Image (cartoon, rainbow, N blue to C red):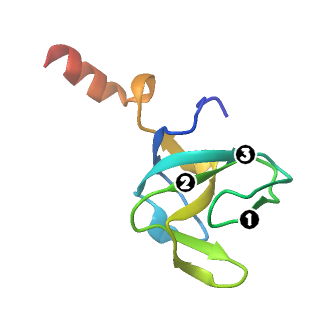
Amino acid sequence: MSNQFKPGDLALVIRCKLVPEMVGKCVELCECVHPNETSFHPGGPWINDGDAPCWIVAGDGLLSNSVRQGVAPHPFSMLPESHLRPLRGDFQPEQQKKEAVHG
């Protein structure tokens, strides 16, 4: 994906099949976990057994799906990069850019 996310960026969750309650949440990106990698970020281990990069994210009111607990409240979660929309700089919707210019 070409979003060029980096740790500390804010993003909007735009889809989440396993935990649909996450859609619409604003999250902070913590760490990228590439396919077939494991991260030991707090709350982990976080295992990406998929075929696309995932991000460990932090935010209020998050839910995480774990083998031990199922879906439960958690300060961190892990989502595929394709399920996130950046909330910074050049990625603002065109309408917001026009409003900022024409004030």
| Callout 1 secondary element | loop
Please give the residue where the numbered disc 2 appears in the rendered image.
57
Please give the residue where the numbered disc 1 appears in the rendered image.
45
Residue type beneath disc 3: Pro
| Callout 2 secondary element | strand
Q: CA distance from mark 1 to mark 3?
A: 16 Å
Residue lying at 59% horizontally and 66% vertically, measured from the top left = 17
Residue type beneath disc 1: Pro
Residue 20: x and y in percent read 50, 69
Q: CA distance from mark 2 to mark 1?
A: 14 Å
Residue 98: x and y in percent read 25, 20
Q: Residues within 10 Å of mark 3 (few under 14, many from 20)?
A: some
Horizontal placement of 31 versus 51: left or right? left
Q: Residue furthest left?
A: 103
Q: Residues within 10 Å of mark 1 (few under 14, many from 20)?
A: few
Tally of numbered discs: 3
Please give the residue where the numbered disc 3 appears in the rendered image.
53
Q: CA distance from mark 3 to mark 2?
A: 13 Å
**Residue mark closest to the camera, 1 vs 3:** 1
Residue 3: x and y in percent read 58, 31
**Residue mark closest to the camera, 2 vs 1:** 1
Residue lying at 45% horizontally and 61% vertically, measured from the top left = 23
User: Mark 2 touching mark 1, by CB under 8 A?
Assistant: no
